[in-house]
Each structure stands twice: as structure tokens, then as C-alpha cells.
């Protein structure tokens, strides 16, 4: 749902300008240095990018699902690492608080997340609990008015730089699966909490991802998201359901960019005395990519609108994530092919997007996990 078309288009135009004029020229440099320069992060703060999905009452823009999807399609037309810097705060790192936080928790954290003063992260995955997140082993033991948390989280986006950690831990060792898991808000500086150095990754350089170590971390009971024990996994699923639509939108932007890049290259590269764009086999790469990008965009926007209308889109959100991430992978692969040998060299736009977008099929539910979800839900209603 778009609330105010004129206002929204002005905001979108501002985002487009920022992405094209300030981010795109830095793409290669950040891929090499693995770091987003602080002045650019400051610009993201000034433009309100950290607070897009946070309600207006807490200083954010309160974007609807459709509005956020459209913004995500714009911001992902440059290297996706830029969006990863502020995306936690407008996605998984704030959404648990937005959907289930107590008024006091929202007052304490959301305004500072919306302004970008603090960076959040969502710490669910563990070495032995990836696709099966309910197998997590991190424990939180009640001691009087406090909980003592011990465990290890891995693959956590922004962990090396985060100020606020949403940590999922088991509070009831007897409960099985999703039951007995609780979400805690843990601030950097709490004794016993530490984060690792960033991993070296295949792509998305500039987006620090690392481990979180919790060694007897003592937090008050008021740190439980929503204040109620045992609700953590439900909170995580609510968060991820919305995030899957966001993420699918983030797969559409790279496809738009890569279609543009394929067209530009195909028009200028000449072989056999003519532009390679004249060859129908090259045209096929472009036509297939453009068609699939349009299909993914349509699915994402339709699902976003349905969610804004209050429809349960759990299955459709999975379909969006699955289809858009697989589509993006196919488009990136075709882009490398259109660029030929140069598409395999470091510094080439197709090569960089190929590495960056590979992640989309892995995190926030692998393609296989989404297929399983979709099958389960389809079989349940037929
Ligand atoms: C760069 C990066 C950033 C990340 N950021 C975060 C973050 O911020 N917060 C967070 O909590 N996590 C994060 N993750 C973790 C991510 O969500 C997990 O890596 C993902 O859920 C997969 O878990 P896994 O790596 O343990 O793979 P596994 O679960 O071990 O899967 C390995 C393979 O087995 C397949 N498989 C597993 N189960 C089934 C099944 N039932 N049926 C069919 N196939 C199956 C998978 O599809 C996959 O192909 C991030 C990961 C990466 C790489």
C-alpha cells in the first residue's frame, strides 16, 4: 500500500540519486577494502535509511510492506553491501522489537535504531543450528530477577559492529523444538558478550558478518523481547516472514542492474564484425533475464500489497524469497556469460554481482527450506 504517492515518489527519487551518485562510484573500492567509509554511513543516517520500516512514532518512516519493497528494489541496484549496512535496522534487527517489544523496549531502542545511532543484529544461527534453528543450544538460566546466557552464535550479520544484539536462547531445557526459546536484547558492553572479527567472505565485502560469544552474560528479565518467556521462536518467525518479502525485493534490484549492464556490454562489444547484441543467443540471455526479473517484481509487489491488507502471506513470502533469489542467481550467471572472459575477472560488475548475490539463496532460509515450507503449506490446503 502506498500511503501518499507524491511524498513517496519524492523519497524514492532521493534514494535513487543517493544510490546512483554516491554509492555506485564506490562499489569497486569497497569490494577491495571490505569497508564502507564512515562519511557514507553518515549520509545513510541523514537520509533516514536506517529507519525506513520503524514506525513514525519512534522516528522512522513507518513504510508499508509495499513501500519498503519498492525502496529495496532501488537500493539493491548497487552492490548489496550498502543496504546490508542499514538493512538490519530496517529489517531483522528491529522487526522483533517492532512486532513484539514492550513499550519500554521500543522507547529505549527504536529511536536510536531509526536514526542509525546504534546498529542492531539478529543472532539466531549457531554452529549446530542453521536450517533447523530450533536446535539451538544457547541457554539462558534464570537467577532471581536476571537470566544468565551462555552459548555461541555464528554467521551473524553486523555482529562485529553491532551495539544491540537480539539473542535467541533456550530458557526451558525440557521443551522441544520451537517451544522454550526466548529472545533477549543484549547491549554491547554487557560483561561476557563478545564478537569475533569479520569473516572473509565470497562476496558482499563491506558487510561485516561474524560470531557472537556469550559467556555467562547476565541480563535483567526486562531484556526479554515482549517480556514473556518462551515466545522467542514465534517472534523470530514473525520477523522473518516480513523479511522474506524485503529480501526478495533485494534480489530484484541486482537483476534490473544486471540487465542494464548486459545490454550496455552487448551493444558495445563487437565480434564477427558486429555488436554481440545482434546475436540471438545473446539476446536470449537478456530476454530471459528481463522476463524473470519482471515476474519476480510482480510477485513481490503483489505479496507486499496483500500483507499490507492483512492477509496471511506466510506461504507467498516463502515463494517470493525462493523465486526471486533463484532468479537473481540465474541472471547473475547469464551476465557473466554475456561479458565473456572479462566477466570472470575481478573488478567486473557481473563478477562482483555473481559473488554478492550468491548469498541470497543461502540465508534467511535456504532455497530447499523454502521449497519444503511451500510444499507443506500447499499440501495442507489441497
Ligand atoms: C553472510 C551470511 C550472513 C548471515 N546472517 C545471519 C544473521 O544475521 N542472523 C542469523 O541468525 N543467521 C545468519 N546467517 C545464517 C544463515 O541463515 C544460515 O547459514 C542458513 O540458515 C543455513 O544454515 P546452515 O548454514 O547451517 O546450513 P545447513 O542448515 O547445514 O544446510 C546445508 C544444506 O542442507 C540443506 N538442508 C538442510 N535441511 C534441509 C531439509 N530439511 N531439507 C532439504 N535440504 C536441507 C540446505 O538447504 C543446505 O543446502 C547468515 C549466513 C551467511 C552466510
Image (cartoon, grey):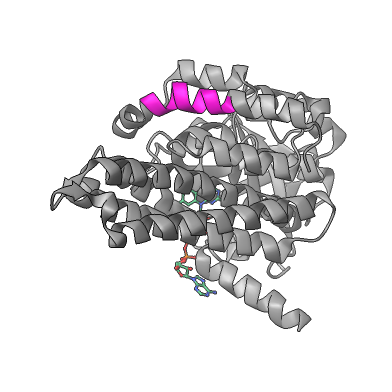
Q: Residue at x 14, y 49 (%)?
A: 273
Q: Which residues are magenta?
A: 15-25
Name the side, left or right, on which 177 lies relative to 103: left
Nearer-the-camera pick, 135 or 64: 64
317 above or below 82? below
289 above or below 166? below
Residue 171, given in percent of the width and then of the height, sits at 72, 56
Residue 29, given in percent of the width and then of the height, sits at 31, 27
**Prevalent SS, magenta region:** helix
Q: Residue at x 21, y 52 (%)?
A: 340
**Count of marks placed on residues:** 0
293 above or below 257? below
Residue 140, given in percent of the width and then of the height, sits at 67, 51
Residue 354, given in percent of the width and then of the height, sits at 35, 50
Q: Residue at x 77, y 39 (%)?
A: 2
Name the side, left or right, on which 100 lies relative to 331: right
Name the side, left or right, on which 272 lies relative to 87: left
Q: Is residue 213 in view?
A: yes
Q: Residue at x 57, y 72 (%)?
A: 371
Nearer-the-camera pick, 168 or 317: 317
Name the side, left or right, on which 267 lies relative to 291: left
Quadrant where the C terminus sits is bottom right
Is 105 inside the magenta-drawn segment?
no
Quadrant where the N terminus sits is top right
Q: Is residue 201 in view?
A: no
Quarter of the rendering containing residue 122: top right
Nearer-the-camera pick, 154 or 309: 309
Amino acid at each position: 500500500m502506498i500511503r501518499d504517492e507524491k511524498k513517496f515518489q519524492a523519497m524514492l527519487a532521493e534514494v535513487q540519486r543517493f544510490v546512483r551518485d554516491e554509492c555506485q562510484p564506490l562499489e569497486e573500492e569497497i569490494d577491495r577494502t571490505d569497508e564502507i567509509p564512515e562519511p557514507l554511513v553518515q549520509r545513510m543516517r541523514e537520509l533516514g535509511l536506517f529507519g525506513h520500516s520503524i514506525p513514525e512514532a519512534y522516528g522512522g518512516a513507518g513504510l508499508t510492506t509495499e513501500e519498503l519493497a519498492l525502496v529495496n528494489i532501488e537500493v539493491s541496484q548497487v552492490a548489496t553491501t550498502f543496504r546490508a549496512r542499514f538493512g538490519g535496522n530496517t529489517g531483522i534487527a528491529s522487526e522483533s522489537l517492532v512486532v513484539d517489544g514492550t513499550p519500554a523496549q521500543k522507547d529505549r531502542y527504536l529511536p536510536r535504531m531509526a536514526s542509525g545511532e546504534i546498529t542492531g543484529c539478529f543472532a539466531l544461527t549457531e554452529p549446530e543450528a542453521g536450517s533447523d534453528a530450533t536446535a539451538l543450544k544457547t541457554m539462558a538460566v534464570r537467577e532471581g530477577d536476571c537470566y544468565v546466557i551462555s552459548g555461541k552464535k555464528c554467521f551473524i550479520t553486523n555482529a562485529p559492529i553491532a551495539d544491540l544484539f537480539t539473542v535467541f536462547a533456550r530458557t526451558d531445557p525440557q521443551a522441544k523444538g520451537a517451544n522454550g526459546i526466548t529472545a533477549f536484547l543484549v547491549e554491547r558492553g554487557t560483561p561476557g558478550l563478545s564478537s569475533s572479527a569479520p569473516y572473509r567472505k565470497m562476496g558482499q565485502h563491506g558487510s561485516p558478518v561474524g560470531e557472537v560469544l556469550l559467556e555467562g552474560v547476565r541480563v535483567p528479565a526486562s531484556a526479554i523481547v515482549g517480556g514473556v518467556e518462551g515466545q522467542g521462536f514465534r517472534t523470530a518467525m514473525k520477523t522473518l516472514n516480513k523479511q522474506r518479502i524485503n529480501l526478495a525485493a533485494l534480489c530484484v534490484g541486482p537483476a534490473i542492474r544486471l540487465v542494464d549492464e548486459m545490454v550496455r556490454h552487448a551493444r558495445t562489444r563487437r565480434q564477427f564484425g558486429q555488436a554481440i547484441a545482434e546475436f540471438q543467443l545473446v539476446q536470449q540471455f537478456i530476454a530471459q533475464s528481463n522476463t524473470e526479473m519482471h515476474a519476480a517484481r510482480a510477485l513481490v509487489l503483489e505479496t507486499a500489497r496483500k500483507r499490507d491488507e492483512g492477509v496471511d502471506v506466510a506461504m507467498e513470502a516463502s515463494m517470493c524469497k525462493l523465486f526471486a533469489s533463484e532468479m537473481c542467481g540465474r541472471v547473475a550467471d547469464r551476465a557473466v556469460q554475456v561479458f565473456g572472459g572479462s566477466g570472470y575477472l575481478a573488478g567486473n560488475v557481473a563478477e562482483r554481482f555473481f559473488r554478492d548475490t550468491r548469498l541470497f539463496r543461502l540465508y534467511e532460509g535456504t532455497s530447499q527450506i523454502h521449497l519444503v515450507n511451500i510444499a507443506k503449506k500447499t499440501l495442507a490446503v489441497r
